[in-house]
């Protein structure tokens, strides 16, 4: 984005003359605004987990923000997630009786791991012909979306597949990953999504890989991490082919979220909340422009994930910006319980999971717009903005809607309703 402010709040190379009345830059790892009077409040009942600037998977204490970084150590922003439960335990010890091993042996959890410790296991294939895998199983419910992720690092087996089978699925599902290229090599079966992300792009070699699926039946769901020799999952093992695993995670959910460590039972993460007073912030209810920079979540189910909301504590008076599982960013407005803007969205508002984007909304009487990444704005020439408000919620909304589940970099609010060309300038890469 070309528009920026320096640390004194002065405009630097801005395509528009306006200076925001509120600017929050979470890349600076601050809840206090760079411009404006209202500091954000962050809360979470338990610990959180995120990737820090040292590229290590880190736990944070209760009520301390998660400042998520990229695999190169660049601070991406504030990570906000809803609660979830990891059903797989223990999450990093494949020698435990809860795991089944076929065609491999597992070391004790003593190898270097993404959390900076020595808690990873090494899976080494034998010389048998067949699959070479570690397996965890859960009792699954038909039609519910499950997400399976695990951290892996290639030793001399550089392709690893995630595989699902069992009574819960009518046919197996596979996602195979190339740990040399850092890519999804191929997939088969009906998946809700698959992901691979480098944990440390500066030489650590760890990746987090994942797949999501919705079983057709209620019953046992078996989830595997398997070696792949380039011809598929069934092959004659070399006796030395190996890869490391850590952080197995199986959950019900609408997004690929942060890993939840477990030891002797399933474990849940606490919901995270970040909000500030719209009154203290000086929110201009009649007209204005709001700019948000964030990374897109990896949505996998039909639940919308909420990026930003301004409301009075209810859905009756609300501006809300959220994404659906098709990756379409959507803007809606309600006033006194009546819909004014009914989810503006189109292919022009599509965002890609894991990638950065910028979005701006304009609101004014009979004049609303949504612009994403410099594309032509979607507009609506009807409706009235709500006048009642008290809260700005970042990465969520009043009423417990599902949170964003990806880093949010910046939020800026302007008192003027900018025109279409200005919205494009604000959001252009």
Image (cartoon, helix red, strand yellow):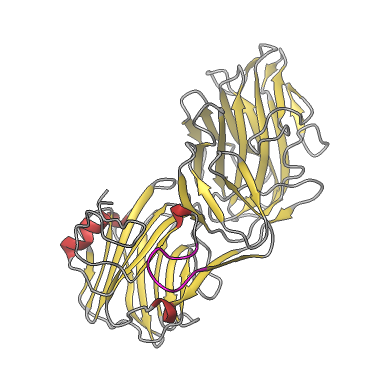
207 and 97: which one is in front? 207
Most prominent secondary structure in the magenta stretch?
loop
* Callout count: 0
In this rendering, the answer to whether 218 lies above or below 365 is above
- What's the magenta region? 31-40
Identity of the residue drawn at 26% across and 60% down: 11
Q: Nearer the viewer, residue 422 or 249?
A: 422
Q: Looking at this rendering, what residue extends furthest in the front direction? A: 8
Whether residue 426 is visible here, answered yes or no, is: yes
Which of 307 and 63 lies nearest the eye of the viewer?
63
Horizontal relation, residue 310 to residue 247: left or right = left
The answer to whether residue 98 is magenta is no
Along the viewing direction, whichever of 106 and 165 lies nearer the viewer: 106
**Residue 351 seen anywhere in this rendered image of the structure:** no
Residue 350 percent location from the top left of the image: 33, 53
Q: Is residue 356 above or below residue 274?
A: above
Above/below status of 368 relative to 322:
below
Q: Position of residue 62 (x, y in %)?
A: 67, 60
Q: Picture coordinates of residue 248 (x, y %)?
A: 67, 40
Examine the rendered structure and indicate whether residue 178 appears above or below residue 39.
Answer: above
Task: Please provide percent x and percent y for residue 112.
Answer: 68, 29
Q: Residue at x 31, y 58 (%)?
A: 5
């Amino acid at each position: 984005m070309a528009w920026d402010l320096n640390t004194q709040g002065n405009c630097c190379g801005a395509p528009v003359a306006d200076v925001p009345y509120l600017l929050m830059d979470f890349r600076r790892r601050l809840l206090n605004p760079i411009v404006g009077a209202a500091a954000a409040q962050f809360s979470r009942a338990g610990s959180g987990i995120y990737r820090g600037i040292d590229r290590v998977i880190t736990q944070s204490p209760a009520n301390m923000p998660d400042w998520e970084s990229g695999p190169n150590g660049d601070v991406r922003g504030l990570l906000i997630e809803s609660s979830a439960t990891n059903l797989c335990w223990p999450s990093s010890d494949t020698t435990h009786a809860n795991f089944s091993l076929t065609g491999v042996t597992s070391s004790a959890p003593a190898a270097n791991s993404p959390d900076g410790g020595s808690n990873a296991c090494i899976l080494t294939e034998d010389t048998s012909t067949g699959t070479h895998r570690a397996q965890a199983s859960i009792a699954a419910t038909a039609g519910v979306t499950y997400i399976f992720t695990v951290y892996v690092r290639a030793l001399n087996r550089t392709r690893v597949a995630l595989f699902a089978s069992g009574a819960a699925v009518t046919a197996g599902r596979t996602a195979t990953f190339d740990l040399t290229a850092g890519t999804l090599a191929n997939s088969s079966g009906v998946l809700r999504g698959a992901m691979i992300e480098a944990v440390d792009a500066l030489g650590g070699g760890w990746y987090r890989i994942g797949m999501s699926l919705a079983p057709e039946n209620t019953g046992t769901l078996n989830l595997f991490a398997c070696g792949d020799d380039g011809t598929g999952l069934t092959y004659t093992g070399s006796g030395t082919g190996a890869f490391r695993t850590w952080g197995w995670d199986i959950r019900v959910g609408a997004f690929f979220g942060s890993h939840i460590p477990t030891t002797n039972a399933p474990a849940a993460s606490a919901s995270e909340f970040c909000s500030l007073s719209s009154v203290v912030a000086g929110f201009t209810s009649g007209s204005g422009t709001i700019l948000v920079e964030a990374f897109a979540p990896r949505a996998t189910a039909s639940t919308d994930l909420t990026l930003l909301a301004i409301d009075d504590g209810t859905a009756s008076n609300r501006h809300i910006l959220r994404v659906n599982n098709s990756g379409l960013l959507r803007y809606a407005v309600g006033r006194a319980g009546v819909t004014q803007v009914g989810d503006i969205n189109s292919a022009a508002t599509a965002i890609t999971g894991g990638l950065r984007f910028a979005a701006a909304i304009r609101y004014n009487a009979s004049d609303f717009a949504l612009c994403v990444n410099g594309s032509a704005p979607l507009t609506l020439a009807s409706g009235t903005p709500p006048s009642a408000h008290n809260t700005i919620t970042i990465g969520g909304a009043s009423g417990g809607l599902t949170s964003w589940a990806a880093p949010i970099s910046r939020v800026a609010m302007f008192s003027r309703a900018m025109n279409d060309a200005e919205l494009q300038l604000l959001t252009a890469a």
